[in-house]
């Protein structure tokens, strides 16, 4: 049976650039934040080997080291970082109530949600192996496309994100194969037109990826036409998956406003949700940019919004 163990002024749910940055600012404002990391401390960046586009690291840095640095900085100012998963939330009660790992009940005056979003993958064994070993499988062309400059790559997807990333890759890479499962795209007409009129993008219609080749790094991809059955091996050194992301917001359904995909709605120019004292930062509320630096920026905003809220209600 759950028991209330403590009351928290500022609870941060989720780690990563957004959560840790929120913690840094909240701690410096003396909000005594407590951050629960979730099942993946550090978030998606812990699965990224090289990070070359985060400001302040001219020689680049690995994702895990960057997250360790942010965590250490948050702790230096007094943030309590705890490994645990918030499994249930009652945001409409006063104070707000939460359950950690379904066993410990806590309450909080304000909460900053930074639960992120998880990339969807095809589900191939070699895809998972090469992704986890930083072997050239990625879900972010903007993050990792630079590493494949002048090379041949493949991208899977048919929506606006896939079309946008294919176009982005075409400016860096020699050749881009775009693997589309059906005979048409879901992307907007404008994005489709852009892809179809880019000379070094070849669209493989009615096609599915059967395997990704390579021992330590991507060396190719086996693609099958699902109408003719014809199999083709692409010689590529990078493989990008752009079939969508799923925001980690299920426990807030029915309480917080969100779109059909689960991205939390926030008020323009702020991180405020539809419930007072509840703020959303990072990828759980951002389906447009999804970058570490924009997540960090929104984390700063969330902490400032939380501080102002607590001052207004007299809780801080």
Image: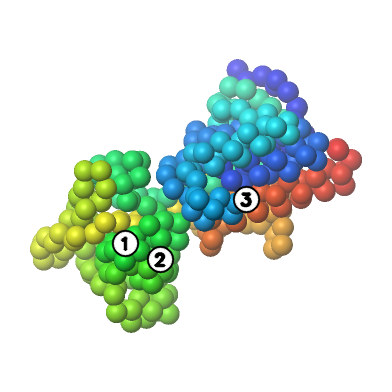
Mark 3 / mark 1, whichever is N-terminal: 1
Mark 2 / mark 3, whichever is N-terminal: 2
Alpha carbons under labels 1 and 2: distance apart: 8 Å
What's the residue at 37%, 68% (across, down)? 172
**Residue 15 left/right relative to 190:** right
Q: Quadrant of residue 101?
A: top right
Mark 1 / mark 2, whichever is N-terminal: 1
Q: Quadrant of residue 34?
A: top right
**Residue 109 left/right relative to 281:** right
Residue at image mark 3: 296
Residue at image mark 2: 165
Percent position of residue 203, x then y: 26, 71
Q: From the viewer's side, name the closer residue of 193 and 185.
A: 193
> Does dot 1 land on a helix, a strand or a loop?
strand
Dot 1 and dot 2 residues touching (CB under 8 Å)? yes
What's the residue at 67%, 36% (across, down)? 74
Percent position of residue 223, x then y: 18, 59
Dot 3 and dot 1 residues touching (CB under 8 Å)? no
Percent position of residue 296, x then y: 62, 50
């Amino acid at each position: 049976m759950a028991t209330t163990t403590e009351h928290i002024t500022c609870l941060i749910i989720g780690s990563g650039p957004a959560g840790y940055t929120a913690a840094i600012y909240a701690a410096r404002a003396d909000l005594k934040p407590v951050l629960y990391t979730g099942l993946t401390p550090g978030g998606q960046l812990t699965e990224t080997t090289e990070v070359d586009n985060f400001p302040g690291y001219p020689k680049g840095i690995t994702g895990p080291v960057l997250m360790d640095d942010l965590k250490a900085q948050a702790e230096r100012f007094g943030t309590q970082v705890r490994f645990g998963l918030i499994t249930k939330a009652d945001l409409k009660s006063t104070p707000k109530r939460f359950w950690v790992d379904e066993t410990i009940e806590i309450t909080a005056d304000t909460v900053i949600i930074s639960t992120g979003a998880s990339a969807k993958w095809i589900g191939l064994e070699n895809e998972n192996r090469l992704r986890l070993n930083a072997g050239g499988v990625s879900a972010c062309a903007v993050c990792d496309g630079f590493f494949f400059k002048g090379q041949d790559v493949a991208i899977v997807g048919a929506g606006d994100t896939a079309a946008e990333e294919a176009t982005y890759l075409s400016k860096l890479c020699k050749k881009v194969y775009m693997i589309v499962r059906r005979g048409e795209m879901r992307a907007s007409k404008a994005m489709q037109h852009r892809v179809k009129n880019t000379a070094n993008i070849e669209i493989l219609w009615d096609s599915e990826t059967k395997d990704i080749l390579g021992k330590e790094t991507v060396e190719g991809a086996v693609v099958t036409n699902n109408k003719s059955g014809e199999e083709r091996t692409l010689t590529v050194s990078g493989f990008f998956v752009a079939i969508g992301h799923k925001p980690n917001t299920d426990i807030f359904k029915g309480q917080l406003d969100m779109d059909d995909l689960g991205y939390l709605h926030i008020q323009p120019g702020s991180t405020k949700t539809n419930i007072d004292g509840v703020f959303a930062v990072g990828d759980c509320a951002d389906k447009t940019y999804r970058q570490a630096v924009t997540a960090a920026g929104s984390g700063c905003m969330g902490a400032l919004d939380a501080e102002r809220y607590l001052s207004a209600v007299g809780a801080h």
